[in-house]
Amino acid sequence: MKRIYLDYLASTPVAPEVFEAMVPYIKEHFGNPASIHSFGEKPQEAIFNAREQVASLLNSKPEEIIFTSCGTEGNNLAIKGIAFANMDRGKHIVISAIEHFSVFYCAKALEDFGFSVSFVPVDNYGMVDPKDVEKAITDNTILVSVMLANNEVGTIQPIEEISKITRKHGVFFHCDAVAAVGQIPVDVRKLGVDSLSLAGNIFYAPKGIGALYLREGVKLWPLFHGGGQEDGRRTGTENLPGIVGLGKAAELAVERLPFRQKHYKQLVQRLKKGIEDRIEEAFFNGHPEKKLPGNLNVSFKYVEGEALLLHMDLAGVAVAGASACMSITAKASHVLEAMGALKDGALGTLLFTVGDETTNDDIDRALEALQNVVAKLRAMSPLYNR
Amino acid sequence: MKRVYLDHAAATPVRKEVLEAMLPYFSKIYANPSSVYDLGTNVKRVLEEQREKVAELIGAGKNEIIFTSSGAEANNIAVKGAALANRKKGKHVIVSAIEHHSVLNSARFLERFHGFEVTFLPVDKYGLASVETLERFLTDETVLVSIMHGNNEIGTIQQISELATSCKERGIAFHTDAVATVGSIPVDVKELNVDLLSLSGPALGAPKGTGALYFKKKLRFVPLIHGGIQENGRRGGTENVPGIVGLGKAAELAISELSSKPLYLQGLRERLVSGILEKIPHVVYTGHPEKRLPGHASFCFEAIEGEALLFMLSRDGIYASTGSACASKALKTSPVLVAIGVAPEIAQGSVVFTLSHENNTEEINHVLEKLPVAVEKLRSFSPVWRKKMAA
């Protein structure tokens, strides 16, 4: 059975070009970038180039890029790092209600160290109202964190407007852009944020590599202390092949952004139309326009979410229920809850995300499977038969 | 020109078998291990197999291992995480004076920003910590002691089990940085009697970007990276799947080689050490002569700058280090050499050779041929040397 993979936001494959760029740094150029002899030269040069490639994807300066091991580390480094480094100015943090768990649990962890956290609500589309952010800011606030695009419903937030507010109030602004980078243009200068996190495995670099943009002049406490790699902001021998891969993936992203946006949008439209045509009582979550092109989040009435996932898997379609990072907890999505989308109850939700390799044929076959699975599950549901 | 690479403590090539094991996990098998469909659960199963291999290498239980992005990260989690989790019990931490920067600076961080008191435990001229000295510094407030297993600059191996047992009897958590020893000599967490142990992937021939932390079951620590369900909530973030597969393979290889490798390395090292001490006058062999890493030889050449000697050696195709690569750019006198009482002017001449199973006798002979010439040449330019000879 041919597998259909529609969970690109959980992970993409490594692009062949990215892999090729990495291999020499696993095989031949294995030196430690910190070494002063010639084995350190190629690695140093490679890291320098990769930093420029990532910076040019984000329109930042190269020295504003810190390599991390994943998006989650980037969020931890920014939120805890900025909060601790500025706690003499205040100990209040504002985050949106639909942040990724890494942001949410960082904020909760800071509560153990005397910080307080406020949550900004979202509307039915999963959209933050900048006015609510402004209302939440107090004299004690030092940091606001709102994600660029939500990883579950894909809604793109009004970051530029929020950054105007944070700047006005002299508050730092972190933006989790893991779901967005590589799929839509992300320009840190335009967005006006102080820090922004990204993850390699969401845009064709390998797992185990990510980056944090940190605006020049913003102070933070490192998560990892030690020998002073990454300008003292992140210690540990650099993941050289991963960094080279991330650089290459950033370069590819610059090249392919127009293609990706068009391709993903077309695929998602086909999927959406197919669901509308074939399955009754299906509801699409997230903003209809201000959303990631490659993301479709849909709930089906009279169907239970776990069963839906299981049967889709049996039918050969790999698709997510919500965020992969919290998959086994089997809790209702906090994002849908915050949007007020769970009031109806008895909803099974699927999150489809497409990638460069996805074809119309994949979409059609996924639709076929989906139609069968939903029909089968509804036939077993006492609620539906009523 | 033939290249003789003797800086394996800084970086080791990824082993062929390791790379081969990793290859499918870049572009072919790429699902997120947290995903619930079978593509994801298959990857998750592979990760758990690697965890078992790493656990087996150090005699730990499978659920006592978390994967990290480096040895330095593991050290940071151990020192900060265990200290902060026990901060209500007490706020005193002891680390040895010759720890790696990631331990030293984690301890300084606790001191500076979380109100901890830190004792930097002195060591003897061989770099050995003693139980008597340690016990003098233990207080009711002590919550964590961190002493490295094998030192990366002077090669000395500590009597960890004695030191750890003394702490355990008092209910104090004990961490050891075993980055230099795991894969190089047999390491067993039960024998060492430690609560926490860090290891690094590259030291085993796994790729950069990998490491692991052993923590004794039920030991509490505050995570450094909060996030999802990964690593049982103890280390958030999507797992570095190819890297972890590489680490597992490297652990498997290490297990099969541990009976022969240390002896081989020790033979090469003895050849190098006795050759150098025989051919070159006024050299200090640093660290303990016997209780040391089998592939580790460290020296201070009097009246010479280590950097200059490295440069000369590299022109002969020989690559070594002045000490810790992680601090190579700082150009300060090594705190490790200061701690074992090497005079600063002698410490300037520090050169460290770290060998691997890929090195051979011929390469050592090449070093023994070139090194005395380089030393003599540098000394002939050295006013310090001339003064010394005149005296």
Image (cartoon, grey):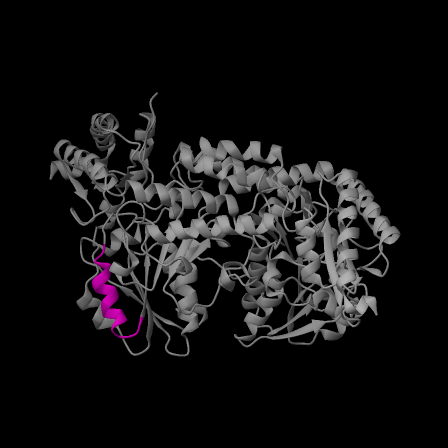
Q: Is residue B164 magenta?
A: yes
Q: Principal SS element in the magenta part?
A: helix
Q: Quadrant of the C terminus of chain B?
A: top left
Q: Give the percent coordinates (x, y) of residue A292.
A: 76, 51
Q: Give the percent coordinates (x, y) of residue B52.
A: 40, 52
Give me the residue at 79% from left, 54% from top: A291
Give me the residue at 85% from left, 61% from top: A281
Q: Give the percent coordinates (x, y) of residue A267.
A: 80, 43
**Figure check: A354 above or below B270:** below
Residues in magenta, as a range: B158-172
Q: Quadrant of residue A22?
A: top right
Give me the residue at 21% from left, 50% from top: B343
**Figure check: A197 above or below A30:** below
Q: Give the percent coordinates (x, y) of residue A50.
A: 58, 39
Viewer-proximal residue, A308 or B184?
Answer: A308
Asked whether residue B325 appears in the rendered view, the answer is: yes
Viewer-proximal residue, A122 or A14?
Answer: A14
Answer left or right for A32 relative to A129: left
Viewer-proximal residue, B157 or A162?
Answer: B157
Q: How many marks?
A: 0
Q: Is residue A380 magenta?
A: no
Asked whether residue B296 appears in the rendered view, the answer is: no
Instruction: Tell which residue pokes out farthest to the right in this image.
Output: A277
Answer left or right for A46 relative to B159: right
Q: Quadrant of the N terminus of chain B?
A: top left
